[in-house]
DNA sequence: AATTTTGTTCAAAAAAAATTGAACAAAATG
DNA sequence: CATTTTGTTCAATTTTTTTTGAACAAAATT
């Protein structure tokens, strides 16, 4: 480094280019609260806390942030942030943004509910629906080759699961259309 | 006990009243498969395996089952089954059924998708939405009392979260209406 | 009223999931 | 081309969640 040994995120020289406020490692109380809200939110979706923290921080940060900065602001490990960002990128909940004069990748939150929902449906829900479909088909053929006294009962139940899945698929489309329309 | 010491579920006398098949501790392959499907299904909802096993077993059993029987068929602990049944009862996913001549409580699966979805929404989703609403109101007042350079950005973001919540609530109603209509 | 049956509770154990951090690779810098 | 920066990977650790099982209470049975 040019100016001093052991230069780091905390090096005053790094901060001089941008407003002190937005680059400070300290989170504002409002930001902490928003992040806490997201941590709770993602728990409902079965996602780890760190993912909620990362998305929340990006959502409530005016500028795109680099991995380093996320690590120091949230005080969680680089590994967690790296994995969390990959997950969020795969879902389309976060996108990379080019920041001139900085070699590091920067990220912002994708904040359109429709996009978030679609990403979650594609990444988390559809794969499950599809594997259920395969298993269900196997079940149907098992039921056809069954001639126990309860065979009819089993067939009725399996048909019912098939109905659930069908309606589940319809619901996802309805959700999608609804989020496309609403403001 | 009248007939022998250590009489249990396995006592032949208990079985004599009903068909051997449906009272056997052995699960049929079809039943195992259906249960596995439910175990996967409830994982998407963030519920423990045992809950999926219990619901699945009841769903794919022709007669209502007592706690004892669930324990021996699934080979899981009495504590798990007791807790799992309570949870499912609270959700309205399982209901008690009177079986004449048997002191034990018996349960069947509630198999209407609409009821299941409503129970889950009431028991798991709504409480979260409500606590989010409270936190969000606090956030709004924090944002009003904030005069940092980023204040406008924060306000915009908080407004956006409010929109998400509003649309989320609308979606739950749409889901409900849809499940009421469809066959 | 003693005993057995039935079901709940909860502390401890086990299992599962998330997080850390150090080693590593790739790319940029000097 | 040696060094630094940036980001990934994954085994080990920590944390969280789930399950177990024994103690207990309530109700029914003998």
Image: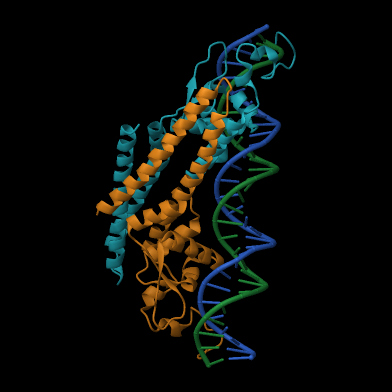
Chain colours: A orange, B cyan, C green, D blue
Residue B179 in view of the camera:
yes
Residue B145 in view of the camera:
no
Please state, as top left, top right, bottom left or bottom right, where the C terminus of chain B lies in the image: top left
Q: Residue at x 31, y 64 (%)?
A: B154
Q: Is residue B98 depicted above or below A84 in this figure?
A: above
Q: Is residue B107 depicted above or below A94 in this figure?
A: above
Horizontally, residue B8 falls left or right of residue A110, namely right
Q: Residue B34's image quarter?
A: top right
Give the percent coordinates (x, y) of residue B135: 36, 52
Q: Residue at x 65, y 14 (%)?
A: B14
Q: Is residue A176 depicted above or below B35 in this figure?
A: below
Q: Residue A62's image quarter?
A: bottom left
Q: Residue at x 39, y 71 (%)?
A: A64
Q: Residue at x 36, y 72 (%)?
A: A63
Q: Is residue B100 depicted above or below A134 in this figure?
A: above
Horizontally, residue B176 falls left or right of residue B87, namely left
- Foreground of the two, A173 or B86: A173
Give the percent coordinates (x, y) of residue B69: 61, 24
Horizontally, residue B70 falls left or right of residue A81, namely right
Give the percent coordinates (x, y) of residue B122: 38, 37
Horizontally, residue A183 falls left or right of residue B73, namely left
């Amino acid at each position: 480094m040019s100016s001093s040994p052991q230069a780091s995120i905390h090096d005053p020289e790094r901060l001089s280019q941008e407003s002190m406020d937005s680059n400070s490692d300290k989170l504002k109380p409002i930001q902490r609260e928003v992040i806490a809200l997201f941590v709770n939110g993602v728990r409902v979706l079965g996602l780890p806390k760190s993912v909620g923290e990362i998305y929340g921080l990006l959502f409530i940060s005016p500028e795109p942030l680099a991995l380093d900065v996320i690590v120091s602001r949230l005080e969680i490990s680089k590994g967690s942030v790296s994995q969390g960002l990959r997950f969020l990128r795969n879902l389309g909940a976060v996108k990379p943004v080019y920041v001139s004069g900085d070699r590091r990748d920067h990220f912002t939150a994708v904040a359109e509910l429709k996009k978030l929902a679609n990403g979650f449906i594609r990444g988390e829900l559809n794969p499950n629906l599809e594997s259920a479909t395969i298993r269900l088909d196997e079940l149907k053929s098992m039921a056809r080759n069954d001639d126990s006294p309860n065979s009819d009962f089993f067939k009725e139940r399996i048909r019912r699961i098939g109905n659930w899945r069908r309606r589940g698929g319809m619901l996802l489309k309805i959700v999608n259309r609804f989020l496309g329309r609403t403001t």
